[in-house]
């Protein structure tokens, strides 16, 4: 697993470097410099989709769970997945640990994250459907559009199987050995010492389908709200597009990153998808790559404080644990 992630990281970095070199760094930097400091507004703007997503996640947790705590954990989860060289599951493992530290029972917290991840896949599928509809409507029939429609049709049964397996497949008890082989001891953070307790907590969540539906709708609204970032940045670059084009760019680049989740931070994947879809809307490759770099700038500025705070908390916890062992 580690070898696969490292290989994906190297390939993604190579693809990103190739795209920048082929287009020319100067042409990519030009729209970024032209927009200037106004680009910093997308950093606080990102709070909106985070809040909408957390409002859905909160429905899967005990009512006393504080919204501020979930916002902090959500920021750490996203920063972990977006900024560190790990596959896009590391943040979820950290999220389970932080929930437990906040007082949420481990099986309940882990179940909420497992179910939320499954619902995120469903929400991203719906978001991708909206993106393809916008692409076909705004750009007309294209080969890419036809291929994306086929991909959506093929992947729909896979999503249905995923939802069913998590509910009825006793997946954690049966795959415990595989999970420890892939993730080592970190798997126990998710599955716990009693996978059956986790499965029971998941079953309790599935017993309330209205919560699942509401969570998915909150997540979908958060994904749609993220389109504002793409729409604004392109306007600041002097290449304004309509809302359908912005939604297609945002949804299909998100879908590409999710599909190739082993590539840390979606290096190269995000840029290539924005370049490919942007061409259909008359967006130059330089502007598409600059848009991706603006998004990465926002990820760094938004996520770094959350990561630094998490590192500080973990360091303090280890220091106190070591001190207690020495005194004992």
Image (spheres, grey):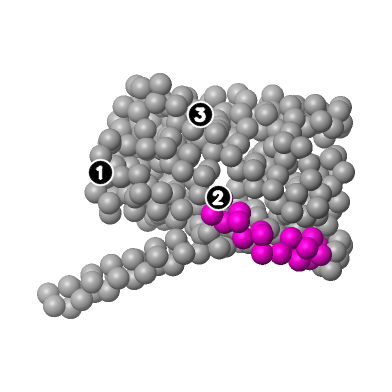
Quadrant in the rendering for residue 61? top left
Q: What element does badge 3 sit on?
A: helix
> Which residue bears the numbered disc 2?
46
Which numbered disc, 1 or 3, marks the residue closer to the eye? 3
Mark identifier at residue 105: 1
Q: Residue furthest bottom?
A: 326
| Earlier-in-chain disc, 1 versus 3 | 1
Relative image position of residue 27 (x, y in whole percent): 85, 64
| Earlier-in-chain disc, 2 versus 3 | 2
Q: What quarter of the picture does the N terminus occupy?
A: bottom right
**Proximity of marks 2 and 1: CB atoms separated by less than 8 Å:** no
Quadrant in the rendering for residue 295? bottom right
Q: CA distance from mark 2 to mark 1?
A: 29 Å
Q: CA distance from mark 1 to mark 3?
A: 26 Å
Q: CA distance from mark 2 to mark 3?
A: 18 Å
Q: Which residues are magenta?
A: 28-45
Q: Nearer the viewer, residue 254 or 221?
A: 221
Residue at image position (54%, 38%) is 222
Q: Main secondary structure of the magenta part?
A: helix
Q: Is residue 270 magenta?
A: no
> Does residue 91 appear in the picture of this structure?
no
Residue at image position (66%, 59%) is 39
Residue at image position (68%, 29%) is 130
Relative image position of residue 289 (x, y in whole percent): 77, 56
Left or right: where 257 falls relative to 180: right
Left or right: where 101 falls relative to 307: left
Q: What element does badge 1 sit on?
A: loop
- Around disc 2, counting alpha carbons within 10 Å, would you say few (fewer than 14), some (14 to 19), or many (20 or more)? some
Q: Residue furthest front?
A: 38
Q: Residue furthest left?
A: 328
> Which residue bears the numbered disc 3?
217
- Around disc 1, counting alpha carbons within 10 Å, would you say few (fewer than 14), some (14 to 19), or many (20 or more)? few
């Amino acid at each position: 697993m580690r070898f696969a992630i490292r290989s994906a990281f190297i390939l993604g970095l190579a693809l990103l470097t190739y795209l920048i070199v082929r287009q020319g760094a100067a042409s990519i930097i030009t729209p970024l410099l032209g927009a200037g400091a106004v680009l910093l507004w997308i950093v606080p703007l990102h709070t909106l989709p985070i809040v909408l997503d957390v409002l859905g996640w909160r429905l899967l947790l005990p009512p006393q769970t504080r919204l501020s705590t979930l916002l902090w954990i959500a920021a750490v989860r996203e920063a972990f997945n977006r900024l560190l060289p790990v596959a896009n599951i590391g943040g979820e493992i950290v999220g389970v640990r932080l929930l437990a530290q906040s007082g949420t029972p481990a099986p309940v917290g882990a179940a909420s994250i497992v179910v939320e991840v499954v619902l995120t896949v469903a929400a991203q599928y719906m978001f991708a459907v909206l993106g393809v509809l916008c692409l076909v409507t705004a750009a007309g029939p294209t080969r890419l559009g036809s291929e994306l429609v086929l991909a959506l049709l093929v992947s729909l049964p896979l999503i249905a199987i995923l939802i069913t397996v998590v509910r009825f497949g006793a997946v954690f008890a049966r795959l415990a050995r595989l999970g420890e082989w892939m993730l080592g001891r970190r798997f126990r953070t998710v599955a716990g010492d009693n996978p059956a307790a986790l499965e029971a907590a998941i079953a309790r969540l599935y017993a309330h389908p209205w919560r699942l539906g509401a969570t998915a709708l909150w997540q979908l609204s958060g994904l749609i709200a993220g389109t504002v970032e793409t729409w604004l940045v392109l306007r600041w670059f002097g290449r304004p597009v309509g809302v359908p084009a912005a939604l297609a760019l945002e949804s299909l680049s998100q879908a590409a990153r999710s599909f190739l989740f082993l590539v840390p931070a979606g290096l190269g994947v995000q840029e290539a998808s924005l370049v490919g879809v942007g061409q259909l809307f008359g967006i130059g490759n330089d502007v598409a790559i600059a848009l991706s770099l603006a998004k990465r700038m926002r990820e760094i500025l938004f996520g770094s404080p959350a990561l630094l705070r998490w590192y500080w908390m973990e360091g303090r916890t280890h220091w106190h644990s070591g001190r207690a062992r020495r005194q004992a």
